[in-house]
Image (cartoon, rainbow, N blue to C red):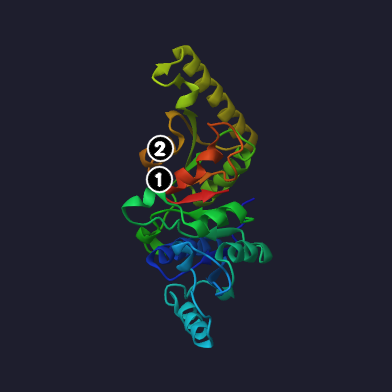
Amino acid sequence: MADFSRILVPVEFSPRCQGAVQYAEALASHYQSKLSLLHVLIPPVVPYGAAEAMMYSGVGDLSAEMLVERRQMLDEFMVEELKNVPVERVLLQGDPAREIADYAARQNCGLIVMPTHGHGPFRRFLLGSVTAKVLHDAPCPVWTGPHMEQAPPHAEIQFRRILCAVDFGLQSRLVLCWAGQFAREFGAALSIVHVIPFTSVRMGNFYFDPDWRLEMIRRARERIEFLKDDLQVDAEELVETGEVAAAVSEAARQCHADLVAIGRGHATGGPGRLRAHAYAILRESPCPVVAI
């Protein structure tokens, strides 16, 4: 069951974080949720080399003046934009990813909303270290994406088409259940995509028997139908062949998705497992991604 009663937004005052807040506000306004804005300062004793992590923190001596300054920045961050939703503003010290995940667990947050922190012309190859660790450790779904700074005002955010990517692993049922509930809540059209990786239908430039590819597609459609019937979900079925992240991203573009739902976790399966490609999907998606 998707839980939106409390939504956590880690902030470091950048345009990307402003966009994340706008998505969180759109959800909070719909679900009557409480927003928690969390800013984490890194104490000087904590070694942390990643430049991206420093954006979440005040690096150096945490003097009283710095604490007051950051408290004021947090208290003033997007006050006017958030005047119609209940908001708490929390300042903590420590490792950003650990503090974010721990706070989400302590407060029973149902969702974390944060940007991926890709930068410049290489953004499609990057996933911020803080976001990556939160995705690994968070006890709840994480809503993220590389284009958060392009988010429209919260009142203009709509969810009309949802794409759910499944790999038939253990998380697929949970992901589809979440996506189905979300689509029904917003009256959105739902599509389910499964990608058969190239390695399953060819070796190098040598393609396997065409009948084998058709059989794999048939089996994938059968498994999607089983999931749909089991969860009583009404959705369009898409079975693609190719590189997983690229195919999911292209499917999102083709169906004009407003959100992509995927599973997350370690790459413990074979080369076609969606979880092994989750970070690449997050980097390449044209729209926000919620990792369940």
Observer-nearest residue: 30 or 154?
A: 154
Counting from the top left corner in percent of width and height, residue 210 is at: 44, 13
Counting from the top left corner in percent of width and height, residue 127 is at: 45, 52
* Label 1 with label 2: CB-CB less than 8 Å: yes
Counting from the top left corner in percent of width and height, residue 169 is at: 61, 35
- Seen from this angle, which residue lies furthest right? 106
Observer-nearest residue: 217 or 268?
A: 268
Q: Which mark is residue 284?
A: 1
Q: Which mark is residue 210?
A: none
Q: Residue shown at 54%/25% (left/top)? A: 220
Q: Residue shown at 56%/53% (left/top)? A: 135
Amino acid type of the residue tagged 1 in the rendering: Glu
| Callout 2 secondary element | helix
Relative placement, left or right, of 247 versus 137 is left
Q: Is residue 258 in sight in this rendering?
A: no
Q: How far, Cα to Cα, is label 1 from label 2? A: 7 Å
Relative placement, left or right, of 254 versus 28 is left
Counting from the top left corner in percent of width and height, residue 272 is at: 53, 31
Amino acid type of the residue tagged 2 in the rendering: Ala
Q: Quadrant of residue 99?
A: bottom right
Relative placement, left or right, of 265 versus 13 is right
